[in-house]
Image (spheres, rainbow, N blue to C red):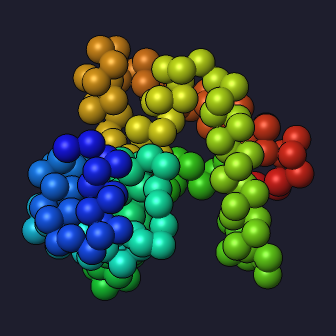
Amino acid sequence: MTDQKIIELYFSRDESAIKYTEEKYGKYCKKIAENVLGDSEDSKECVNDTWFKVWQAIPPLRPDNFKVFLAKIARNLAINKYKSKTSIKRGGSNMDDIYEEIALCIPDASKNIESEYLEKELSSIISDFLKKQPVQRSNFFVRRYFFNETMEEIAKRYKVSTGNVMTSLSRTRKELKKYLESEGYVC
């Protein structure tokens, strides 16, 4: 079933929309959640919560890209669950490593009163930066810092060495830091 037809089922408040969404995107959303959480059971819970959030959001929202819409919801739910779990205990996923890598080149918007506006602006600047990068470098960056894939998973996906991925990500982070500084962001 096409994404548009599934979205129309949501607008009709037809509960089969959830079934079709799960059939088409269940494994995809679970993989995103597992990359954040490192735990299969918590990931299943996040996926179920994703379907509930989608049911609440559509309507009134009509996503242009349903797959990305689902990915963002699943990822945000997983990150929230991760934060909740790690405030109690440490370990279980690669999120600490990913945050540590990227923290050195992206400023912390939470330290500013206008953080929501700055976060949107920062997101736009990062997107512009990534559009200017070679496709593979941009893909590596998104796979690592949005989908939370390990460097080994990225290397396997693109049939390159792990060292190649590490070097590419390191260079991209350095260039991003310079780009952000040129845009007035201090890290």
- Residue under the point 67% across and 44% down: 126
Q: Does 60 sit above or below residue 95?
A: below
Q: Position of residue 77 (x, y in %)?
A: 35, 70
User: In screen coordinates, is 183 left or right of 26?
Assistant: right
User: Which residue is the extreme one toward the front?
Assistant: 12
Quarter holding the N terminus? top left
User: Which residue is the extreme one toward the bottom?
Assistant: 88
Residue 30 shows up from this direction: no
User: In screen coordinates, is 104 left or right of 48?
Assistant: right
- Residue under the point 42% across and 55% down: 69
In terms of image quadrants, where is residue 6? bottom left
- Residue under the point 69% across and 25% down: 132
Quarter holding the C terminus? bottom right
In terms of image quadrants, where is residue 119? bottom right
Q: Position of residue 173 (x, y in %)?
A: 62, 37
In terms of image quadrants, where is residue 158? top left
- Residue under the point 65% across and 30% down: 131
Q: Position of residue 71 (x, y in %)?
A: 36, 54
Which one is in front, 158 or 181? 158
Which one is in front, 22 or 81? 22
Residue 81 shows up from this direction: yes
Which one is in front, 59 or 32? 59
Q: Position of residue 156 (x, y in %)?
A: 26, 23
Q: Does 117 sit above or below residue 27?
A: below
User: In screen coordinates, is 136 left or right of 86?
Assistant: right
Q: How many marks?
A: 0
